[in-house]
Amino acid sequence: MNRIKEVLETKELTQMWLSKELGKSYNMVNSYVQNRRQPSIEILFKIAKILDVKPQDLLKEN
């Protein structure tokens, strides 16, 4: 499980913005945000850098 949606909401950013910054389709980012699909470690680190948070801030325990 990830906290990408929560971080985006806190920073008042959109999934569309993240998809452009990440170079991924909106559908892919939406699947990450909705926890239907988990990003690879590499992508998780890239998302963390884009959002200016630590990678572990994007993860939550089950």
Image: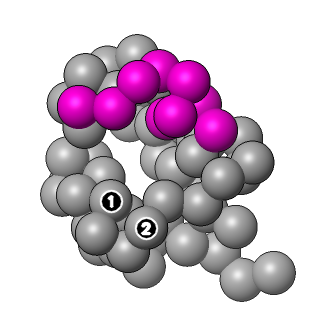
Kind of residue indicated by mark 2: Ser
| Front in this rendered view, residue 34 or 28 | 28
Whether residue 60 appears in magenta in the rendering, the answer is no
Question: Toward which corner of the image does residue 11 lie, by quadrant?
Answer: top left
From this view, report whether residue 61 is shown above or below residue 23. below
Q: Residues within 10 Å of mark 1 (few under 14, many from 20)?
A: few
Please provide the residue range marked out in magenta.
Answer: 23-31
Res 15 seen here: yes
Above/below status of 61 relative to 18? below
What percent of the width, then of the height, locates residue 12? 42, 25
Residue, x 81% and y 81% (percent of image)? 62
What residue sits right under mark 1 in the picture? 43
Colouring used for the render? one colour
* Amino acid type of the residue tagged 1 in the rendering: Ile
In the picture, measured across the screen, residue 41 lies left or right of residue 51, that is right
Which residue is at 30% across, 52% downward? 47
Q: Which mark identifies residue 40? A: 2
The residue that appears at 41% across and 24% down in the rendered structure is: 25
Mark 1: secondary structure = helix
Quadrant into which the N terminus falls: bottom right
